[in-house]
Each structure stands twice: as C-alpha cells, then as structure tokens.
Image (spheres, rainbow, N blue to C red):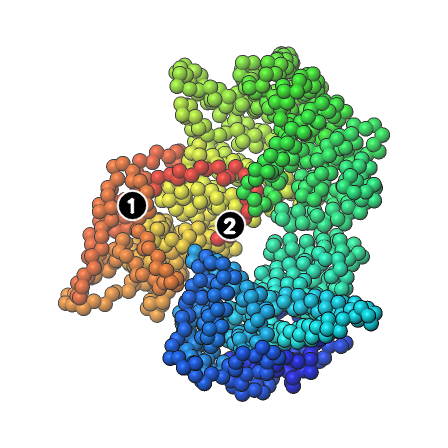
Amino acid sequence: MPTLWSPSSQLHGSASDSVSSPCQKSVGSTQMALSPCSSTSLPCDDRNSQDTAEWDSPSVSTNEDSDFEDSSRRNVKKRAAKRPRRAAPVAKHRKKRSRIVSSWNGKSESVPPTSDLFDAVKAAKSDMQSLVDEWLENYKQDENAGFLELINFFIRSCGCKSIVTPEMFKMMSNSEIIQHLTEQFNEDSGDYPLTASGPSWKKFHGSFCEFVKTLVYQCQYSLLYDSFPMDDLISLLIGLSDSQVRAFRHTSTLAAMKLMTSLVRVALQLSLHKDNNQRQYEAERNKGPEQRALERLESLLEKRKEFQENQEEIEGMMNAIFRGVFVHRYRDILPEIRAICIEEIGCWMQSYSTSFLNDSYLKYIGWTLHDKHKDVRLKCLKALEGLYSNQELSTRMELFTNRFKDRMVSMVMDRECEVAVEAIRLLTLILKNMEGVLTNADCEKIYSIVYISNRAMASSAGEFVYWKIFYPECEAKAVGGRERRRSPQAQRTFIYLLLAFFMESEHHNHAAYLVDSLWDCAGSYLKDWESLTSLLLQKDQNLGDVQERMLIEILVSSARQAAEGQPPVGRITGKKGLTAKERKLQAYDKVKLAEHLIPLLPQLLAKFSADAENVAPLLHLLSYFDLSIYCTQRLEKHLELLLQQLQEVVVKHVEPEVLEAAARGLYLLCKREFTFFSRVDFARSQLVDLLTDRFQQELDDLMQSSFLDEDEVYSLTATLKRLSAFYNAHDLTRWEIYEPCSRLLQKAVDTGEVPHQVILPALSLVYFSILWTLTHISESTSQKQLMSLKKRMVAFCELCQSCLSDVDPEIQEQPSDDCRGTGFPKAPCLFPEATLQSELASFLMDHVFLQPGELGNGQSQEDHVQIELLHQRRRLLAGFCKLLLYGVLELDAASDVFKHYNKFYEDYGDIIKETLTRARQIDRCQCSRILLLSLKQLYTELMQEQGPQGLTELPAFIEMRDLARRFALSFGPQQLHNRDLVVMLHKEGIKFSLSELPPAGSSREPPNLAFLELLSEFSPRLFHQDKQLLLSYLEKCLQHVSKARHPWGPVTTYYHSLNPVENTAEASPKGPPHSKKRRVEGPCRPQGEEPSFQEESLQLNSSPPTPTLTSTAVKRRQSLRPVGKRQKGRPGPRSELICSQQLSGTQKFKMSSAHYFQIQCDPSGSGLGKQLTRLSLMEEDEEEELGLLDGSSEEWQGGDKLLHSPSPSEHGLDLLDTTELNMEDF
C-alpha cells in the first residue's frame, strides 16, 4: 500500500514524488501563500542542534527539520501554486462540479444563512448527526451555497462577524478572502468562542470538535473523496492557521487537527478493508480452476483498486494538513495551540500506529517535552502514556526511549505537581512494559518522593515503588492467579521488603507517609493485620528491635488509614470528602480492625510493655477501634485484660508520650453510653487511688524531712507526672489534689528545698485543677465558690511570678505555658499585675530574642538539637503573643515583640506578622501607636548607647530604617483606609523628634531629630494633601525650636520624602525648608502679612485625586471610613469629619484650625500600660511636653472630634496555636 508522507521528506523545494493526490499537489504547495502574513512561532526551550543531530536517524534528509531547527531557513520563500486561482483539482472519481462558478444556477445571488449552523452547534441541543445530515441535504440541493454555509460556520467560530459572500467566493482567492476577514476582524476584546467564558460558551469547544468529527464520518462514503468541498476546506483552514490573528489561528488549528484525527480513523478503516479484500482475493485465487469464480475475482480487483484510490486520497489530505498546519503550529507562540497539536498527534500514533508510530513523528513529542508551559508538557506525557501502556507499541519506541529517557526522568521533579505526577506514571508504564530500561539511579530519584507532602505525587511514586520492588518478588513467591496475593508466603515477603525499604530510606519517623503512599496500590497487603500481628507475636521472627519498632509503626499507620480514610497530617490532598462507597468501606475496615486487634492488643502490650517507643503507638490503636464491639460481641474478658495492661503500663513508665496515650485510651473507654462504663470507671478509680495514696505518702515524707535521696525524689516526680497526665484528660477534682500541690509549691518558694524535678508537674496539677473547676461553673454557682476560685487563681499567678526568677530554665518556661485567659461566661476575671507583666516581658528578652553570641557554639550542637531549641523559643513567643491578643496582657506590651520583627524575621517572622495583623484587627489606632513606640524604644536605646552624634551612620540605625520600612509595608495597599493612621503616626513622630531641645543659643540639632529619617519611610503612604499639611506643621514647629536656619540633615531628608519632586529645587541649604505656597487667582495679600496656617494647608478629609485605573472594570470607590458598628456615644460622621467644600474660581480652601488632623484614639481605654515599668518612653506624660509643642498641637486636636476605631475583630484568635507557620514577606 502507498505509504503516508512522513516528516522525513523535504518540506521546501519541489513537490515530492510520494505526493500522489491532487490535493497534495494543490493544497500542499500553497500552504503559506494563502495568508497575507505569517504568524509568530516559538521554538521550545532546552533544545539545540546537537540534540537534533543525536536524535535524527541517518535516513532523514538534511532539510527535514529546517522549519524547526535552522532559523535562517524559516524565511525561505515557499513555492507558488501550480494551479490557477480557481482551477479545480482533477478528481479521481465521482466529480460533481467544478469550484469555478459562472452563475448560481440561474438563481439570484443571495447571502446564505450563516448563523443557523453556528447557533445550532453553540446551543449543543440537537444531535450532531442529524445536524450534519441536514447540512448534507442542503449541500446536495445547492453545492455552492452549502459550501459557503460551512465556510462561514468556521469563520463565525473564530469570532469574526464578517462573512464570505458569493461575490467574494467567486472573485477572490483564499489569501485575499483571509486578508479581507483579517481587516474586518474586531480585536477589541481578546475573547472568542473557544476562550469565551459564560454558560452559553461552556460547551462550545466540545460541540465544535464533535461537529468536525461527525462531518467526516458522515461524508466518508460520499463527499470525502470529492475534491471540491474537502480540498478547498483544507486549503482554507491551512490559510487561517497561518494568520497572525490569534482567534483565526487557534480555531482553524483545532478544526484542522480534529479533521486530521477523523481522517486517520477513516484511513485505518480503509486499511482494514483493504487487507480483508486482499485476503479474500488470495483465497479466491488459490482455489482450483473449477471452483474459481472469475467474476468474483474481477469484483475483488475492482474493489481493491477503489480502496487504493480512496486511501491515496485520504493520505493526500492528511499529508496536506500535517505539512500545512501541524509542522508550523506545534511550535506556535500560543501554548493552547501547541497543546492541541501534541494531543492530536498522540491520538494519531495510537489509532494508526502503522503509519505514525515512527521516529519521524515521535521526535515532535520528544522536543516538546522541554516546553515552558505546563499544559503542553502535560499533553506530551499523556500522549506518551497512551503509547507506553501498550506493550506492543512500546517495543517499537526503543530509539525514542533511549534519546529522551533522561528528560522524562528529570520531569519527576517538575515544578508543576500535575506534570510530575504524569511523569511518574509514565515511568511506571516504562518500568512495566520495557524491562531493563530504567537504571537503579533512575529509580532512586523516585523512591524519596513517597515521603513528599503532595499526595498525588506520593501516591504515584508509591505505585512505582510497588511495581519495582514488591510486585516481582511477591508474584514469584505466589502460586498463580489472584490467589497469590493472599498467600502467606507472598504476604510475608511483602512485609520484609517493606521493612527493608523503610530502613534504607532513613525516614524512620514517617511511617504514616509511606503507608499512605502505598495505600492505593498495596492496600490489600497493608490491611492484612493478621500477618502483621502474627509476625510481631511470633517468637522466632528474626526481627531486630528497630525492625519491630518500624513494624509497629506500620501497623498503627495502616490502622489509622483504614479507620479515618484521610492522609496523615501535612499531606496535601485535593479531595474534599469521602464518597458513599468509601465511607462504607471505611466502616467495614474499622469493624474488621477491631474484631482482629481487640483480642490481640493485650498480648502486644504485654510483650512490648518494657519499651516506651513501642507501647505508645500500640495504645494509639484504641483511637481507631469501634469500641462498641466490646459489648456487641461479648469481648468483656479482653477488656479486663486490656485494663490490667493499662495499669501496668502507667505504673511502669514515666515518659510523657506513654502516659498521654494511656490517659487518652482510658478516656475513650470511659464513655457513659457504653455498657461497660462502670467497669472502666472502677478501674480508673483504682488507678487514681493508687497514685494519690502514693503521692500523699511521699509528700508527707518531703514535708517532714529537709533532705530526700535520689530514689525518693524520682518516685515523687514519677507519681506527679502520672497524676498530671491523667488530670489533663480526666476530672480528678474529687481526689482534692490542689491543696497538697499548693503546699508543696509554697514550700518551694519559701525555702527552696524542693527539688526542681518536682516543681514542674506540681505546677501542671495546680493549673489543671483550676481549669477543671472552671468547667463546673454555671448559673447556679454560688458567690462563695467563685471567690474561692478567684483566690486560687491569684495564688497561682503569684506562684508563676515567683517561678520566673528561678535559676532552672525549665521552671522559668513553664509559667508562660500555664498563664492563659479564660473564656467562661461567669468566670472571675483576673488580670496579672504590672510587675508580672514586666517580668514576662523581661523573660521574653532573655529567653527568646537571643543574640547570636548568646546561643552558644552552634558548631558543637547537632542540627536536630538546634531545631528543637528553636521550636521551644517559638512556642514561648507564640504563648506570649496569645496573652497579648486574648487581653491577658496589655496590647502596648507588643512593642517588645514588634521591635524585633526585622532582626529576627527568619526565626519568628511568621508569628510576629500574625500578631501584628491580629492587633490591627483589635484596634487599628492603638496598633499604629505601638509600631511608633517600638521605633521610639529602639532609637532611645541606641542613643543611650552611642550618643546623639553620628547616629545615622551606624549599622543599628540602618536596621531601624529597614524595620520602619517593613512597618510601613504592613499597612497594605489600602491607602485611603489607613489615611488617618499614617497622619497620626507622622504627627506623633514629629513631636517626638522635637521633644528635647538643644541648649539655648546652640546651633546643635535636637537629640531626637534623627528620628525624622525613620519617619520618612512612612511618607509614601501619605496623600499629597497630607504631605503639604505636614510640611506646614513641621515648618511651624521648627520655627518655635530655633529662629535661625540650620542645615540639619534629617530635616532635609524628611522634607524630601514629603515633597520629592516639586520642592527639590526650592530646598534651602541654609535653614528649614518652606512649604510650597499654592498659586491662587484673586486679590493679593497685603504686603508683610504672613499667610495663615489655615489657608496654606489642605483638609485632611478632602478626597484625593482619582488614580489612573489599570483595570477595565471600574471599581467601587472606597469610603473614607471603615465599615463597622459605631461605639455608643460616638458622634456621627458629620461631627467627626468636616467635609471639604470645593470653591470655584478665586476662592480658597478654608477650615477652622481646631479641626486639623483629627486623630483616632480610644478615650475609654483603661489599659494597664501606664503601670508598666519599662522604658521611660512608655511612661511619657504629654503634659510635660514643651509649651511650644502644646501650643502648636492645639491646631491638631479636635476635642471630641475623633475618628472612629473599629470594634475588635469577631474572628477567632487561634491561628497562633501552631507555631509552624509559613514565613512570607510582604
């Protein structure tokens, strides 16, 4: 049979001898002459001529890749068409009429309906087959009108409102038609039917592709082989695909590729019919002379000739589309077009592998694996998956695999997770169908992905690991068929291989991630709890201690996965919930798990009770059981054994993880809905009685004697730890543990003779006692009980305060975890005293914000130790920030945290940023004042250390400027919303910079004047009107400070930050700058009269100029004031802000000086900040400011006319419960 044209033939030059179809001669030669201009092509990256030379086979001609590789050959002029403009190609058979139309059959030349076909496809309501049949009937009645309707359908599908008229059809060539359509195309909007959004266009893409497919199928026995409609349609699509108009290029490429796909399937059917005809002919010819039918032989020969002609005709059309569209558009600048080409060539290779599955076509997919767009790379991988999934096809791709294997392996670490998942799946198919291709080094790159956080990638890597490591060995140990997966030998082999893989991976703390990765492909092995437990309980299992521990972790992880059906914490999954089938399977697995493990759990605890690392995971199994099975299946005897083992474990161990697991397991069993609650409650009472009796005895010994040996101290500490773990999960109030613990702690404070090991659990017991007492508070609680509880809380705070001065760091850190706010409605409110708050702040400085030299020698400490210490410091900082946000500490104390934002950003930036965000939600005005207070504190500390001279050149001052810049960025892009806050911050900063004056008659600058440079970092957040107002205020303040003009650098810097463009040339180097006077028309001011401050300044609440919009959607203008409920007693907006009046012509803006800079504050705030003993700046009394500043500040005070402060946020303040947050910059 004639072979299909391959890309190895020359694309430029004379016509190839293999092109036998007239369509090939006509359309193929004019593929680029049809468009008025050529489109832009974008080669894929990471590809060079060396790669091409390495891939190309020797048989490929030198010009085959000229349109892709050699840019100098892209501009070679293509050959001109050999036929006349409207000459019809010679048809092989069933030629109906020529395309040259002298008249329209005597009819009037009217424009055919162009919207009927397009609207029907767009609506997607009718059957495509009936729609195509209707068009065929119209075509048979009037071929030219029908063809025009089809052409205009494709034109309308491109989004072009122009149509091809009969006159254009008769008198213009394709290139002229396309040029006319391009000129008429309206590109005001980038949307066209294939990319338009909305419900009306939602199904257009699928309907359009279905229409093209149905059109070919319905015409495959009639019009498909007529040169007039199909050849001219292909010619038009080739011309449109080369247009610079994106809509034309995209739509025509999609149509041409779908047309090509349908033609490939028709060619495949023709090939099958031809082969069948050949077999019939051979069979008939091999018959004897008496049985041979000559008429049948002639009929078969005629049929074969017809098949041959049809196949040549189809191949000619396919060659024309491939050469005219695919070869140029697979490297189009638009990624959607490149993705279409790669997707369709993959379909051609799968459907018609005889002609398309060769290296000449595969190289296009290989090259495009380097594409910069993820969708194109994704289409390449999916196309290859369809090929490698067929073992017969994969054997024909050895050369391609060897050439592009390294690229496919490297794509498992693609930056796009979707691409990485498909790359792993592709390598899995290569592993299954091509033995020995992937080396051990290639496989090791995938092994570690099973521990990655993305579940799709981890699951794909788990499947690869299963087929690489587990499947061959497990299948070799099996007998055959599906039963081999259930054979004990195969299961035992799987477990040993899993343990070996787990140990070699060196991720021994992530068994849950490994199990989750293998769950989809090896779930039947992992849910075989019988084999897992039998191997653990077997005496001669030949497992080491590490292997036993790993096997227990795998058992617990598989139980959790089956019971919860969710991936482990930290693993990302796209699923929102379980389906009904998955929930049913989950319930079934949970019951099976409980039925098998409930009888065996006491045996496992008895065997591994001596090892804390094994006991704690085993106790977690109770969380995954359906505990009602103890009742329904009469397993009470196993419950008794479990309670005995629980008591032995508690008495034997003091590790926190073991005690917490035991307390939680007992808590799960102590539910009143269970019929065995009385038994469990009795066992719990026995255990607590045993612990409390031992505690009372050991406490009496401690109180009576002043010295205890190490064994007695260890015993008392262990008892307190056990009681603390159980008090955390169980209400032990009736055992009255508070009083003896209080006496113990009081003796520790008074005498210091109590060992430090005892103090920590005793503090926890007192803390849990108070919390459990709070849970009992209700409306019926008496006042006496409330006062008793308050007395306990006061005593506990005093104990915590005394512990802050302890020499043991563990004891110092414990109170910071125990000081919490209470959320109970009737609970007594207790705020710590100012001294306690001050000590907490000092503790934070000494234990969290440590200088690099105070951390010790980092080289001598192991990495995990340093990480653990960092987590501990983060936990302390998060606890302090929660005390601030919950109102336990005054919010002003946040300045001790904010001032370290920039310096410790790498370690605590996420926590401080979250605290800053929440503090702004609570009180915007106060938060801004705290930011300014932080800068004041840092500036004062630096000035006390270095003196006022040369501060701006110090590295510490540069760090302060960076901190101020970060604070300024924290206000966000809502400039209008934060306008009052930024102005207030500048005003307070100016007052601070001039708060201390130099000696009288001295030319030295004020000591705090350099603070203006820090303040200049907030200037970009000001509106132009506010900058002018601040300039006037600064000038007036400087005139009160010094009548002479001095060249003070900070003032000049701050002045330039407020007015960098207009007044740069007017800046006076000899003194304070003048504010720029506005030019107004009207009567001149009398000579010698000073311009009033009111006339020079603009109103604060005047609307700023509307900025230039950068979006096509006009956004709703933001209001000046934040939306929220007003506090009672607050004046309305009319009394808070004085509306600006725009005066026309010669009038000026005027307003009362009493209304300048109305700053937001909270007059009713009764904070404790004035009681704190911190820097003198925090206790600064505004009444002690200089009289000149007080006088000038009257212009800024508005009395009761204060801006509104939003109420505290209703959002929960619990985001700081975790200190492992992602750090991101502004």
Amino acid type, callout 2: Asn
Residue 999 relative to residue 969: left or right: left
The quadrant in which residue 69 appears is bottom right
Give the x, y percent position of residue 1010. 41, 55
Tell me which numbered mark, 2 or 1, is placed earlier along the sequence.
2
Distance from disc 2 to disc 1, alpha carbons, whole Å, reads: 30 Å
Q: Is residue 189 above or below residue 846?
A: below
Q: Is residue 1209 above or below residue 324?
A: above
Badge count = 2
The quadrant in which residue 573 appears is top right
Characterize the local packing of mark 2: few (<14), some (14-19) or many (20 or more) Cα atoms within 10 angstroms.
many
Q: Is residue 912 above or below residue 374?
A: above
Residue 617 relative to residue 901: left or right: right
Frontmost residue, 378 versus 755: 378
Give the x, y percent position of residue 890. 42, 35
Residue 105 in view of the camera? yes
Point 26% across, 39% down: residue: 1130
Q: According to the image, label 1 marks what residue?
A: 1203
Label number found at residue 801 = none
Point 82% across, 37% down: residue: 489
Residue 564 in view of the camera? no
Frontmost residue, 982 versus 279: 279
For numbered disc 1, what is the local secondary structure? Answer: loop
Q: Nearer the viewer, mark 2 or mark 1?
A: 1
Q: According to the image, label 2 marks what residue?
A: 902
Characterize the local packing of mark 1: few (<14), some (14-19) or many (20 or more) Cα atoms within 10 angstroms.
many
Amino acid type, callout 1: Leu
Residue 793 relative to residue 540: left or right: left
Give the x, y percent position of residue 1012. 39, 55
